[in-house]
């Protein structure tokens, strides 16, 4: 899953990004409302964490503009304000949830996971994907091969998740990079091959097929 944080308190933004990256998400960070609206409007994010008090364009206006343009990405609003009026205004502009600073990081992660889970269920998708003896629970972030649980790193799970939600389809290396690594990543794109190789070792060699020149496909009939 790819998340966007729009927060002008840079230390807070960096802290949140590090924590959410450790949870296995690809996280991008911007520090003003106009840039946040531009990036969120590209439609490549699974969730936006949006501060209200932003330079350029406040969070209310960013949220309203995204909804007016037809974007249904879940939005979790952050604010230093407190009070029913502010919460009502945020939700009236189309936010899905609201968190008042200072907040517990554990609570923020729980809210993020709940919003992502709710979005998946709203789209009619199950968080548990079963393909032969492979079972991947994207909500609990657990993987089973037969009766045995397989321990994956956060990045390994994120790569597998991109393949399992589109099982049987070819997923390009660029698509995996886009959703698992943030936009600032400028390293070797072959890093995807490294993680696919690790998954093959931990799961089963023939489970992930390389489609030459196109990407990777999770085999569904095995």
Image: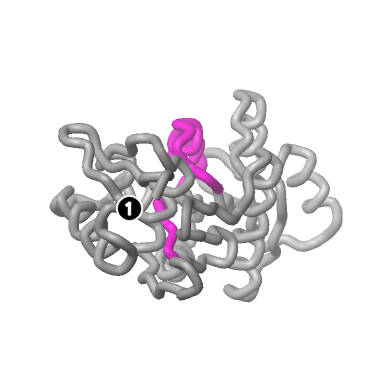
Residue 36 position within the rendered picture, expressed as x and y whole percent measured from the top left: 48, 41
Q: Residue at x 44, y 66 (%)?
A: 145
Compared to 155, does 120 lie above or below?
Answer: above
Residue 196 position by quadrant: bottom left
Queried whether the magenta region covers residue 106, the answer comes back as no
Residue 136 left/right relative to 187 = right
Queried whether the magenta region covers residue 40, the answer comes back as yes
**In front of the other: 116 or 89:** 116
**In front of the other: 110 or 37:** 110
Residue 17 position within the rendered picture, expressed as x and y whole percent measured from the top left: 43, 63
Total marks drawn? 1
Residue 41 position within the rendered picture, expressed as x and y whole percent measured from the top left: 49, 31
Q: How is the image coloured?
A: one colour
Residue sticking out furthest to the right: 84
Residue 108 position by quadrant: bottom right
**In front of the other: 122 or 74:** 122
Magenta stretch bounds = 24-47
Q: Residue at x 55, y 48 (%)?
A: 48
Residue 76 position within the rendered picture, expressed as x and y whole percent measured from the top left: 64, 52
Classify mark 1: residues with Cα within 10 Å, few (<14), some (14-19) or many (20+): some
Q: Residue at x 15, y 51 (%)?
A: 190
**In front of the other: 141 or 143:** 143
Q: Secondary structure at mark 1?
A: helix
Query: What residue did someone put label 1 on?
Result: 207
Q: Residue at x 65, y 45 (%)?
A: 119
């Amino acid at each position: 899953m790819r998340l966007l944080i729009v927060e002008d308190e840079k230390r807070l933004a960096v802290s949140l990004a590090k924590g959410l990256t450790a949870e296995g998400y690809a996280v991008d960070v911007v520090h003003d409302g106009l840039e946040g609206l531009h990036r969120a409007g590209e439609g490549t994010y699974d969730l936006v964490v949006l501060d209200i008090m932003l330079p350029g364009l406040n969070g209310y206006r960013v949220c309203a503009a995204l909804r007016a343009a037809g974007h249904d990405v879940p939005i979790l609003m952050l604010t230093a304000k407190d009070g029913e009026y502010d919460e009502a205004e945020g939700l009236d502009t189309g936010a899905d949830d609201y968190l008042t600073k200072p907040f517990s990081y554990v609570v923020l992660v729980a809210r993020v996971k709940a919003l992502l889970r709710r979005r998946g269920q709203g789209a009619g998708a199950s968080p548990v994907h079963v393909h032969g003896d492979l079972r991947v629970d994207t909500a609990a972030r657990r993987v089973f091969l037969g009766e045995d649980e397989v321990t994956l790193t956060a990045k390994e799970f994120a790569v597998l998740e991109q393949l399992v939600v589109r099982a049987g389809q070819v997923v390009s290396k660029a698509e995996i990079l886009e959703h698992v690594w943030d936009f600032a990543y400028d390293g070797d794109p072959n890093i995807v091959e490294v993680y696919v190789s690790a998954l093959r070792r931990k799961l089963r060699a023939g489970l992930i097929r390389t489609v030459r020149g196109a990407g990777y496909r999770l085999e569904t009939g095995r």
